[in-house]
Amino acid sequence: MGDKKSDSQVFLWDHPMSSYAQKVRLALREKGIAFQFETPKGIGTGYETSTDAAFWKSSNRIEVPVLIDGDLKIFDSTVILEYLEDKWPEPALLPPRDQAAARAKARMIEDVCDTQYEAINWAMGEVGWFKRAEGELAEKLKAQAAHQTRQIQDWLAQQLGSSEWFGGDRFGWADVCVAPMLNRSVLAGMGPEPGSPLANWHARLCQRPAVQETFNEVAAAIKNAAGLGDALKKGLLKREYRDHRLEWMVKSGGIEIVLEGLKKDNIRFQWPDPLP
């Protein structure tokens, strides 16, 4: 991990449970970039009147993470990582520019994690914490999640091969992107087979100071996750159904959850906003 860069004025709108925000915090810490971060008041409510005004104005998407560097405000975790790599190139997370295939592989792994993998983890949060499904439907969705998680982890194991890290012998971009997603599976009891190369990668990962700090923040946030289902039922939250999350629910047999959420007005979609 790099030395702290004291000239930075970076601020991050963040939530400790967000896999996308975790990815950014990991990158900042691995690069040794000094930063401050805060969870916006009212995040997840979907209502402007109950959300931190400064956060609401930081991005039309009203989602974390948002990185602020001076007058610049950047949303989307991938764009944020690219900005950090451009402005603070050392230590590099992406392979060198003359290694086009390795750079493409790292970005491909990130895309799978940010879409297909994140959707599964997020859906299990809908079932487990927010109680959108119970009984037979809950069991059906859990079985789908376990089945699809195994497929993604098998694919990730192929990308890792016999290497120490996804980028070979150097911790890098792909490791940062896989870390929050795979760790969420481990916490949910859907981690890789003990002793497997992917499980050993996770064990090595957890020895890194930047990872330990970030995962400790996740563990602390989980302790405060009780009662989320009640908050949803009371109309205090509007969960965001991004495109890949919506697709997962539809293909995995949870479309009635979406329809019920629309009926109760406790789900929302990304900007731009539809007509009322």
Image (spheres, grey):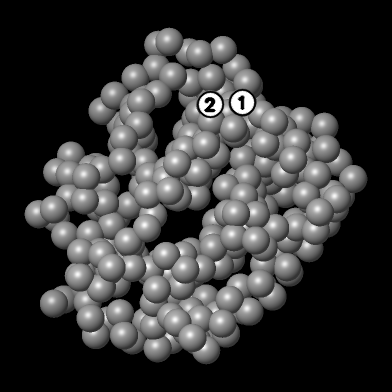
Location of residue 7 (image quadrant)? top left
* 66 lies left or right of 153: left
Name the amino acid type tagged 1. Answer: Pro
Residue 40 horizontal/vertical position (percent): 26, 43
Residue under the point 45% across and 50% down: 222
Q: Looking at this view, is 260 or 117 the one in front?
A: 260
Identify the residue shown where x is 45% and y is 82%. 134
Question: What number is the disc on residue 134?
Answer: none
Q: Is residue 219 above or below residue 170?
A: below
Residue 209 disc label? 1
Q: Is residue 79 above or below residue 267?
A: above
Residue at x 81%, y 54% (from the top left corner): 194
Residue 24 located left or right of residue 11: right
Q: Position of residue 225 (x, y in %)?
A: 39, 54
In whole angstroms, how far apart are the C-alphas of marks 1 and 2? 9 Å
- Secondary structure type for disc 1: helix
- Residue in the foreground of this view, choosing between 258 and 199: 199
The location of residue 31, given as percent across then percent down, is 56, 23
In this rendering, does residue 67 appear at all? yes
Quarter that holds the C terminus: bottom left
> Residue 29 shows which numbered tag?
2
Residue 141 percent coordinates (x, y): 55, 80
Does the rendering let one see residue 111? no
Q: Foreground: 224 or 100?
A: 224
Quarter of the image where the N terminus is located: top right
> Do callouts 1 and 2 mark residues in contact (Cβ within 8 Å)?
yes
